[in-house]
Image (spheres, helix red, strand yellow):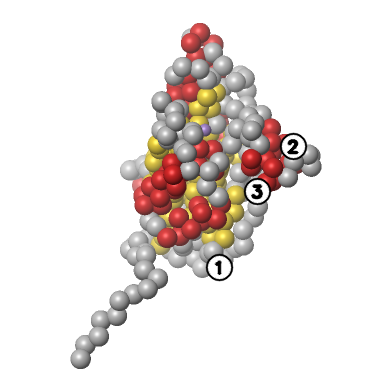
Amino acid sequence: MWHRWLKPKKKNITPLAYEFVVSVQTDVGCRRESNEDAGRCVKPHDPELLSNKGVLVMVADGMGGYAAGEVASRLAVDVISRAYYEEKVTAPVALKKAFEQANRAIYEQARKDETLKGMGTTCTALVLQNRSAFAAHVGDSRLYLVRDDAIYQQTEDHSAVREMVKRGLLSVAEAQRHPERNVLVRAMGRHPNVEVVVWEEPLSVCAGDRFLLCSDGLHDLVTDEEMKQAVLDNDPPAACERLIALAKQRGGHDNITVGVVQVQPVGEDAPVNMPKTRQVEVRL
Ligand SMILES: [Mn+2]
């Protein structure tokens, strides 16, 4: 299935090239004993590979008994990071194939090992290649774009409550509080094949754009508006820390994983966040 979600406005500023400042952080949270989330950023050193395939950022949220969730989310990011760069096809097709390979690897592993039976994982991946971005996902780990002063959700959760919202059975607010809001209708590794949502066309990136990827441990507890503010007020590592701290202040009932990407023209220093009130030096 090819899909595009909420199209933000285009801007007409095109510098020569962009670089991507990335931070991905994960935290066990306050209640769980282990972290079944996984997150990763892959930046190839080879300039040709970087130009052809770009930078890959992923968040996966595993599920299953014992350590199975950890195995599933780790397998997803491992297989996708290898397969995506190996596939000798266009970048979006490579990403779709990499997801399919990861799905199969998790499914086969669960079939071979009784203790891993029924394991699965979400996975949301973002690729930043030259001047464009595209994404793929399965499950309810989300991708957002922050452009100018607005935040746009770029993925649609594969959850039971989202289906109910679409059928008009629940409002968005009701879905957010629903006790079964974390029940997925689609996950990686549950079946031999999976339907992966991949963007049909890339999104042109602009200087100052920020992307945010997160597991439900974050979006359950932190609003879109708070995510937007955190990425606008902080550089990527500090934004991840701030958002994880916010989710933990609110109970941190699940593992929390956040990835933040900042797009900036090559050669330009990372923007310094000016405080709202500034001391002015007065010379007499
Ligand atoms: Mn979770």
Q: Is residue 134 left or right of residue 186?
A: left
Residue type at mark 2 is: Met
Q: Nearer the viewer, residue 144 or 253?
A: 253
The kind of secondary structure element at disc 3 is loop
Taking the spot 64% from the left edge, 31% from the top edge, the residue there is 180
Mark sitting earlier along the chain (2/1): 1
Residue 77: horizontal and vertical position, in percent? 45, 31
The kind of secondary structure element at disc 2 is helix
Q: Is residue 125 above or below residue 262?
A: above
Quadrant of image for the C terminus: bottom left
Taking the spot 62% from the left edge, 62% from the top edge, the residue there is 9
Residue type at mark 3 is: Trp
* Label 2 sits on residue: 164
Residue 55: horizontal and vertical position, in percent? 43, 45
Taking the spot 36% from the left edge, 68% from the top edge, the residue there is 274
Residue type at mark 1 is: Asn
Residue labelled 2 has its Cβ within 8 Å of some atom of ligand 1? no
Q: Nearer the viewer, residue 144 or 207?
A: 144
